[in-house]
Image (cartoon, grey):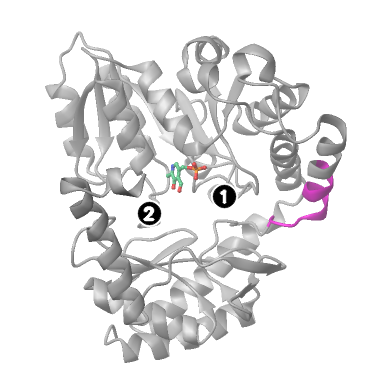
Amino acid sequence: MEETLVNGKFEERIRFWKNRVETLSAADLYFYNQPVEELHGGVRVLVHGREMLMFASYSYLGLIGHPQINAAAKAAIDEFGTGTHGVRLLAGTLKLHRDLEAVIARFKGTADAVTFSSGYVTNLTAISTLVGRHDVVICDKLNHASIVDGCLLSGAELLRFRHNDMAELERCLQRADAAALKLVVVDAVFSMDGDVIDLPRTVELCRKYGAILMVDEAHSVGVLGRRGHGIEEHFGLENAIDLKMGTLSKTIPSVGGYLAGRQDLMQMFRHASRAFIFSAALPPAQAAAAKAAFEVMEAEPERVEQLRQNAAQFIGGLKASGFDTMRTETAIVPVLCGADERAFTMVRHCQHEDVFVLPVVSPAVPEGLARLRATVTAAHTPDDIDRALRVFERAGKRAGVI
Ligand SMILES: Cc1ncc(COP(=O)(O)O)c(C=O)c1O
């Protein structure tokens, strides 16, 4: 097998990645793909036998390992086993899926919801079901890769506007053929920068130009709004978004993705979206865990306020040390380093002092904007955050970032 692959252009491509990983590893600057061996309450993790403070988790409300959620997953395995009977459209739909979808619809204030086996696939299938050739899709330039891939897959004309620049969004809407079906897709909270889309203006423009609005709430559910219901709650808007997309893999400690909106729109996805028709249903344990997690969020709203306080302490402390945390307003906290090397060096110092944080470098972000992408959760204590801040400060000085 190797012999047939490793020739010509393929060989060059494989060698590029091999060299990159080997060069970084040799300099003790490679920190990706490290297995977490144990989870101690979600915030302390064992990596290579060392206990580290986790500052790279998407478990924003600290729900990983919640007893009620674990119990729901175990009960679902006892009742339904570990797999499904296939794809959702055919034999794969369990009562658990419909119960989960009802809970999501209630949580998001919509008539219905539909789930898929990952958030990534949800974006691919949603966009490519909604639009196709002869249609126009308009995106913020910092939208998540899964949105970009969905747009490319759809075959629609793709127009992109400068990040959160509403004048440019309007120009794109004006440029699009007036007769074309227009879809605007934005992240609620941007996954690399932690800032929030100007939803009120986006909604206004979509209505003015007759465009459908889809918002990816991967990083806003559990984070934005007094009860963590997301971006509409944050801005005090209701029914402003035509299609709400979210993941079950971040605040919700499971895996999967969902779409929420009008009942007839969800009906369309249940019959026309390829991920629903051609990919296996969420396993029972994951569906039950996700449903229980939404219920825990409703029952324990104090976690959202705790997260907000923790984010304020963390961002305030970093700024006081002289770091540039860019535009963040949420639990995703970029710590700008500049060159890729600086980000790698800073991470090395942090990890050597047992703070688990990771670098984001080019091409994931533009060259010169490499950063640590730290995340803070409701499960961190003020002492955890203080300890991490001291480590960040020492690491930042050693790496020449501050
Ligand atoms: C904004 C955004 N959308 C979609 C996804 C994909 O979700 P999942 O990891 O559940 O496939 C991610 C994942 O990181 C994300 O950050």
Vertical side of 247 occupied by 89: above or below: above
Label 1 near ligand 1 (CB < 8 Å): yes
Q: Which residue matches tag 1?
A: 250
Residues 383 and 77: in front is: 77
The total of numbered circles placed on residues is: 2
Q: Which mark is residue 195?
A: 2
SS at mark 2 in the image? loop
Q: Residue at x 50, y 46 (%)?
A: 220
Residues 284 and 55: in front is: 284
**Residue 36 image offset from top left, x and y in percent:** 60, 67
Asked whether, in this view, residue 104 is left or right of residue 10, the answer is: right
Residues 151 and 142: in front is: 151
**Residue 152 image offset from top left, x and y in percent:** 27, 29
Name the residue type under label 2: Asp
Asked whether, in this view, residue 339 is left or right of residue 3, the answer is: left
Reply yes or no: does residue 277 show up in magenta. Answer: no
Quadrant of the rendering where the C terminus is positioned:
bottom left
**Residue 107 image offset from top left, x and y in percent:** 65, 33
Q: Residue at x 53, y 70 (%)?
A: 55
* Label 2 vs 1, first from the N-terminus: 2
From this viewpoint, is residue 336 visible?
Answer: no
What residue span does the magenta drawing correspond to? Answer: 63-72
